[in-house]
Amino acid sequence: MSYEVHDLSRLLGQSTEHALKAIIGEGGAKVAFFHLKLGECLDDVGETGRRLTLMFKMGTPVLEKAIVKELQARLGVPAKEQPTFNFEDSVEELRRVMVTRDAKGYQR
C-alpha cells in the first residue's frame, strides 16, 4: 500500500489516537481529542504539539515520541534513535519520506 503526501494528516490523526489510547486509555483519548479539537489542527504539526502541551504539560514529549513511533510504523519507516527529539522536525522528516516515495512511485 502506498500513501500520498496528503494522507499525512489522516495518518497523524490515527497515530495520535493510537498513542493516546495506549498511554491514557480509550476514554481518555476520546476526551483529549474532543477537548483539544485535535481533528482541526492535524495539518499544522506545530499547533498539534501546542495543543497537546496545553493538556499534557511535561508529559507531552512521551506522547509525541509515541505518536512519531506509530507514524513510522504505519509508513514502514524504521525508527531511529535521535539524540534530541523534536516533534515537528520528526513529522516533517516523515513528510519528506512520503514526498520522496510519491515521486518514485513507492509501494509499501
Image: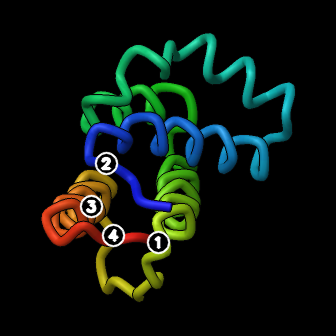
Given contact means CB atoms under 8 Å apart, are the residues at marks 2 and 3 in contact? yes
- In 3D space, how far apart are the residues under numbered discs 2 and 4 (Cα atoms)? 25 Å
Residue that label 2 marks: 4
Image coords of residue 98 (percent x, y): 26, 61
For residue 95, which quarter of the picture?
bottom left
Residue that label 3 marks: 98
Given contact means CB atoms under 8 Å apart, are the residues at marks 1 and 3 in contact? no
- In 3D space, how far apart are the residues under numbered discs 2 and 3 (Cα atoms)? 7 Å
Residue at image point 52% right, 17% down = 36
- In 3D space, how far apart are the residues under numbered discs 2 and 1 (Cα atoms)? 11 Å
- In 3D space, how far apart are the residues under numbered discs 3 and 4 (Cα atoms)? 20 Å
Q: Name above or below for residue 16 compared with residue 78.
A: above
Image coords of residue 55 (percent x, y): 55, 27
The local secondary structure at tag 3 comes to helix
Amino acid type of the residue tagged 2 in the rendering: Glu
Residue at image point 22% right, 60% down = 102
Residue that label 1 marks: 108
Q: Nearer the viewer, residue 23 or 1?
A: 1
Q: Which mark is residue 85?
A: 4
Amino acid type of the residue tagged 1 in the rendering: Arg
